[in-house]
Structures are given as C-alpha cells and as structure tokens.
Amino acid sequence: MSLDELDDLFDLAKLGIDAPTNDQLYQMYGIFLNDFVTNKMTIQGKQLMVNMGKSNHLLFKRKSETFVHLVTRENKYTGKRVFDRERANRIHWIRPILENVSDNRILFFEKVNDKGINQLYYWYKERDFIIIIREIKPALLLITSFCVDVTKKNMYTSWYRQYKDS
C-alpha cells in the first residue's frame, strides 16, 4: 500500500470515543495480527517483533500488549491507558509507513531514550503520525504509534534535525 492510499480505517463518527465496537476491535486486531504476527517484517536486516504478552486492560483482555499500546494512550492524570480512537483508526498505517521509509515524506531518526536504549522513529510528518521502534538485540520491538499533537511537533522536529546534523 502506498502512502497516498492511507485513510482512516473507520468513519470517525462511527468509532466510539471510549471504546471500539466488538466488530471494530475484531477488525483492528486482525490487521495487527496480519501485519506483524502472521506476516513477519524485517527492518534494517532485523526482525520486527511485537510483545504478544496478554494484556489485562479492561477493554482489551488477552490481546497483545503491543496491540494495546497501538490503540490506547496513557492518561497523564491516572497513569492508566485509555482508548485513543485517532491512533486506533490508523493501526493499518504502520506497516505501509515502515515499508515506504525511502519516501521523502517519512522522516527517519534515532534517539536514545531515558533508559539508554536506542529507538527508531518513523514520522509521517504531513499526516502527523509517528511510529516508535526500540532496538532489542538482535531484533527490533514495535513500541507504539500515535498522532503527533501540535505541542510535540517542535520536539520531534528538533530530534530529527539533531539526528540529521550528527
């Protein structure tokens, strides 16, 4: 799939604010399994892994922990993960973005996180969507993806420029 073909998975008006319907959840989880479990992916010669540990999240019990991070965000006040319909509605964007990294619309950079682990960032800037992958030798681990909000754009732009200048 090309970047030009990317669109929302569901009509946003029909996607719940607090949770997807069972049919929507089934479709999102099916995409996740197809894109990252059934059809393995290699990036920079390394296997892309997902955490298949079973979640205890109320809405996503027994689903993959990685999947939960792709469809939820952390509530800054409670620390709990809540459904994020914008990121969930773009779960099918992740693989095409990673497959089209050579497209000049994808900004790639690396940055060491606060735990000293290198992370790879794939930012589809014109659509405000970013994917984060962590190096776990000898493989890579898909951590999360999300819509970049306006308050974080400058930070990611700065990280990208620092990476390009180094």
Image: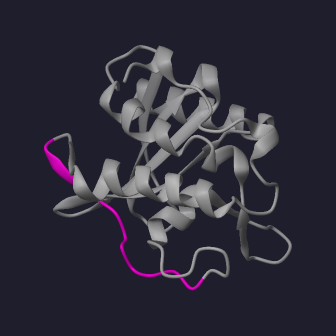
Residue range corresponding to the magenta coloring: 45-56
* Residue 139 screen position, x and y as percent: 21, 59
* Residue 34 screen position, x and y as percent: 32, 51
Q: Residue at x 58, y 26 (%)?
A: 7
Q: Residue at x 65, y 61 (%)?
A: 72
Viewed as shown, does residue 128 lie left or right of 140? right
In the foreground, 97 or 83: 83
Q: Residue at x 17, y 50 (%)?
A: 46
Viewed as shown, does residue 3 lie left or right of 158? left
Residue 148 shown in magenta: no
Where residue 54 sits, quadrant-wise, is bottom left
Tell me the chief SS of the magenta region.
loop
* Residue 22 screen position, x and y as percent: 63, 64
Q: Residue at x 31, y 19 (%)?
A: 102
Among all residues in the image, which is located at the extreme front? 23
Residue 52 shown in magenta: yes
Q: How is the image coloured?
A: one colour
Task: Indicate whether 138 appears above or below 2.
Answer: below
In the foreground, 150 or 71: 71
Q: In this orientation, does residue 92 appear? A: yes
Where residue 142 sits, quadrant-wise, is bottom left
Image quadrant where one finds the N terminus: top left
In the foreground, 145 or 18: 18
